[in-house]
Image (cartoon, rainbow, N blue to C red):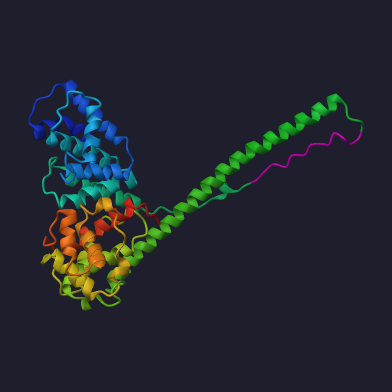
Amino acid sequence: MNHSAKDYFPDWYGSAIKASETPEQLLKYRKGIDKILESDSYQFWITGVKVYAGIVKDHEEGYQQFWNLFKEHDNLLPVKCDHLLRFLIGCALAEEIEKGYQQTSAFIALGVLVTSRISKEQILTPLYDIAYKGWIDICEVNRNVELEEIGTQSDVALTKVVVKSVTSGEAPTAASFMEYTKAVEAGINIIVKELKINITKLNSAITQIDDITRNCKIVAEESNMLWYIFTGLSNLAGKKLNEVNAIDLPILVAFDLFGLITQLPGTGKISNLMSKAFSLTSAKSEENVQLSTAINSVCTNIENIDSAIPEINPDLTAICPILTSISMCKNFGMPEWPVVFSAQTKLSAEAVYSASDLCLNLYQELLLNKMYNGESN
């Protein structure tokens, strides 16, 4: 039997908080979780992710926003109970991801994935796995291509209604005028009815056309990705991947593949394509690289890198370290940017990644930033 995050709430609570609660108390917590689940605001959810990860602290406004949601249902809730709040938010994150709403659920899943690399503490142990599976599943569903023929049921036809003029023939009377108005009304009702039917048909046809257009974009996107791997030619660097310095490859491949994404939330099963790109070169995907070293190198060696760096949303700088680093390198230059980066994010520019993780993490950060900024294709 398949269980959902909502089914596991009481058990998760018992194992994580290690305290016995009455059913009434758990119900109050449940109401707070349900209140969180009502939101479809990206800003609200990304704040929740940061509170869960311990990035937003108890003295900050975002933290209090979530605390107050539970306080509404339990006036006796202790003022300081950080572990409890973060756990309850984690339950809400898991449930929202499992809803499978294509945009919101994928956005939250990406937020959890990129944040989990910064905050190693997982209060809710299964959350990373739920986020990873959720993101993959949503991406796959979103990319299913279904083409249907637009049939003759979408043809538009209106009945010709003829009403004899009241002024023709004999002099009009009150009775003949009444008969005329009734005939006109009946004719109008027929036309309105058929217009409604045909508008429905037209809307159906328009929807099908939109679906076909979207499916064509997905097919083109998949084709472009496969062509990228087949040719081994970097769109951003303008040369073969095997001609690129090994240290620049992870960031370059992430930007190249992200640049081919036209349909959000993107491609979930991207790791295989990244591995194939690495296999075209002498670079080793498991080799470790320091963040600042990789950023300095790619900003120096890839002339067009500035054109590919998007404006990062300020709400994401603390959870998207790679994209933030590249952006700061662009804005502040070397050697100043690592100092600014550490001061603003409280993270270290000396963090070490494997080449494959650096590539995948940056790709996911780019997608998260694009979704948060509301960019659509």
On screen, residue 270 versus residue 154, left or right, reads left
Instruction: Indicate yes or no whether the magenta region holds residue 163.
Output: yes
Comparing 28 with 67, the one in front is 67
Across and down, in percent, residue 152 comes to: 57, 49
Write the residue at 32% across / 38% down: 39
Residue 299 sits in which quadrant?
bottom left
Q: Residue furthest right?
A: 170
Q: Which residues are magenta?
A: 157-169
Considering the image in quadrants, where does the N terminus appear?
A: top left
Across and down, in percent, residue 363 comes to: 25, 60
Question: In the image, is residue 201 above or below residue 251?
Answer: above
On screen, residue 111 versus residue 101, left or right, reads left
Question: In the image, is residue 200 above or below residue 265?
Answer: above
Comparing 282 with 1, the one in front is 282
Question: In the image, is residue 218 above or below residue 49?
Answer: below
Determine the main secondary structure of the stretch shown in magenta: loop
On screen, residue 232 versus residue 213, left or right, reads left
Write the residue at 45% across / 52% down: 211
Instruction: Indicate yes or no whether the magenta region holds residue 285.
Output: no
Considering the image in quadrants, where does the C terminus appear?
A: bottom left
